[in-house]
Image (spheres, rainbow, N blue to C red):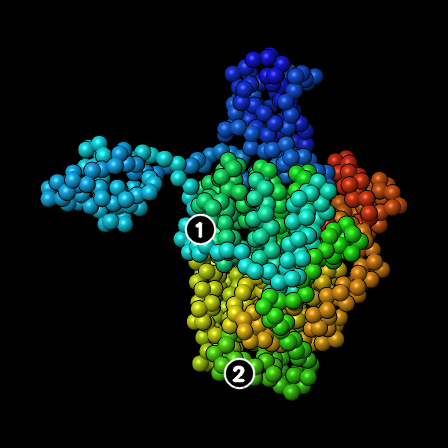
Amino acid sequence: MAALARPNYVRVIIDRAIHRELDYLVPDSLAPQVDVGSRVRVPFRDRSALATVLAVLEKSDARGIRPVEAIVGDGPILSTQLLELAKWMSTYYCCPVETVIRSLLPQVVRKAQVGWKKQLVVHRTRDIPADEIEKLRKRAPRQAELAEAINGLPQPKLAAALLRQLSLDNQALRGLVKRGWVEVREEQVARDPHAEDHILPTNNLALNPEQAGALRIVTEALNAPDTARPILLHGVTGSGKTEIYLQAIRGTLDKGHTAIVLVPEISLTPQTVERFKGRFTDHPDMVAVLHSHLSEGERHDEWHKIHSGKARIVIGARSAVFAPLKQLGLIVVDEEHESTYKQEDAPRYHARDVAIVRAKIEKCVVLLGSATPSLESYYNATRGKYRLATLTQRVDEKQMPQIRIVDLRQERRKQKTAAILSEKLSTAITDRLEKREQSILFLNRRGFSTSLLCSECGEARNCPNCSVALTFHRQIARLSCHLCGHTAAVPKKCPECGKDALIYAGFGTEKVESTVSHLFPQAVVRRMDADSMTRKEAYRETLRNFRTGKIDILVGTQMIAKGLHFPNVTLVGIINADLALHLPDFRAGERTFQLLTQVAGRAGRGEVRGEVFVQTYTPFSPSIQFARHHDFSGYFEQELEFRERCDFPPFKHAVLITVRSGHEGRAKLSAETLVRRLRESLGAEFILGDAAPAPLEKLQGQFRFHILIRGEAIMRLSRLLRETLDKLPFPEDVSVAVDVDPYQLL
Ligand SMILES: [Zn+2]
Ligand SMILES: [Zn+2]
């Protein structure tokens, strides 16, 4: 072996955030196993630390260089492409590269503490002669039965499963081992999180002309990935986007490439997973699934199934964009407008944007799909940066639902109190119950009453840690904070003035459920929100019961807004469309339009045309009117004009800095100091706002101040920010978070 080919030194980044790359010597014994992307254990200060190899070097100028202690795991676990992606993220999102690597690799893989599960597997040593089995039948009938079953096995089988199936015990198996007919070996077995799923194999469905046109655009890109632009598939709800994904993936596999499908966590339902597993039954490990509800063991297995090349398709939530597939050919981002693609902790990345950069690095195709594309993506499509494919029709010529607006101001005059259900909506529910059709009622707020007020002194019960009112939950009979989880007993009298004058105001899904059950005693009503779905199985159960018609009315939060497909749902009621509109957020209008369109899209997926009732106090707001007329382009133009006028994305990038401390004065002072420094370091090309209390001033006991910066040259801005922050010492109890392209402005 040539001496030069051996790595002498490696440059690594250790897992702890020290913002620095370090060089280490590679001992000869470890040299053959070290490569870029390897995980190693190295001495750091007086301890040892885990690290990732960024580069292999022939020499190093560093002084006092120490040797690598050990290699962790087998072989490199990060490809050079993923390392390049990590470096890009670190610069763009103004975040240390070690924090990015922590996101890229699941903890169980980084630390390599969990291994494969070992289980006993039965192997046949040879075909067992039938006459010998017959001879055995009298003396040892159980052994004979087992031998017969083993003879019929097409492949080795888990001992436990085989014995359970035949209701036999270990003794029979031991007997056969003694005869030398079978062997039992301990082997690696993947924990399959979806082993219980019922998978029905499916074939390609026939495409309508619009779908075929869209698939053609994707196929063209797959044939020339080097020059392909990202594709935006804008298809109305029910237009068959998933079928296009499935056929595009088949095309990708046919070229020997692999594919990632990103879906929002919330729509990563068993229904979705089954659909993909059912189409790609080539071998049982074909499709890997990554999401936040996997156990550590399952995550380890799925990750290695992908890394070893067994799985060719990965379907998963946000972090699946980092799936270690080789020969990546296609990344699909379904519901690309979803805000759950944005990670709210460092690194504060957006999976759609990372997907586009990864696609550029790996020279693969990226396909974004949505019924309500984000303003950013649609803007890119209109400017030719993305290719646009449009589906205007639902499959099988199903009609778009009829959307009716109910003016709650008029209802209030009629009913004298804040109505939960307007007359029109309740008549429509009665009608559906008579026809044995199903209804969905949507409200983006959980709990029973949203505040507990004193009618004498006007004080509300607020969370002691956060600047929000506590929500009353009847099921647990307590007040609870939706931001920090603090709960409190319900006081009998007003703690402020001592009067017996407390009233419950506002309502959430819990109250909608109870009102609806009361009004329609003959109906089966179920609720689906974060409170009622605490058990892992509850979600699946409720969906199954709804699909099989055991539930008449489903009440829920955004948990039921997306991706679900129930042919018998003909009515959707949106209890209060105004909730998102009045948030202090430049995306409020966009969110309302998207939510209304998505929720409305749950209606009329079967034979009967759907009907949607939108209850609102602001019936003439543009988002509601455009959603009502299914008018995406009207909404887009109107919203775009507003964004341009106010220097918001997609015209300028925004960066939100949050300065936090348990001490209000120190948070404020630090934020003001930071703004002064930024005025010096940022040029006039950036719009720098003042330090101001965040809309949510106090959260989990921390006082929060915001600084908003806008500008076009985002990479430059990120670099200047990093430099300024590194030079500025903050008091110990003050923390600063930088959010590039923020989604959460509260
Ligand atoms: Zn009071
Ligand atoms: Zn709180």
Q: Residue furthest right?
A: 684
Q: Is mark 2 on a helix, strand or loop?
A: helix
Seen at 66% across and 71% down, the residue is 577
- Near-viewer residue (462 or 230): 230
For the residues marked 2 and 1, what is the alpha-carbon distance in whole angstroms? Answer: 39 Å
Q: Which residue is rendered at x = 54% and y = 35% of the image?
A: 110
Q: Any atom of ligand 2 within 8 Å of the CB at mark 2?
A: no
Quick check: 185 left or right of 461?
left
Q: How would you rate the neighbour count of disc 1 (Cα within 10 Å): few for under 14, some for 14-19, many for 20 or more?
A: some
Q: Where is residue 237 in the image (x, y as percent from the top left)?
A: 62, 65
Q: Which amino acid does label 1 sit on?
A: His
Q: Can residue 663 be seen in this snapshot?
A: no
Counting from the top left corner in percent of width and height, residue 7 is at 60, 18
* In the image, residue 367 above or below residue 52: below
Q: Quadrant of the N terminus?
A: top right
Read off the residue under disc 1: 194
Residue depicted at x 49% and y 39% = 310
Amino acid type at image mark 2:
Asp
Judge whether residue 421 can be spotted in this image: yes
Q: Name the residue under label 2.
A: 431
Decide which of 743, 245 is in the foreground and name it: 245
First in sequence, mark 2 or 1: give its number.
1
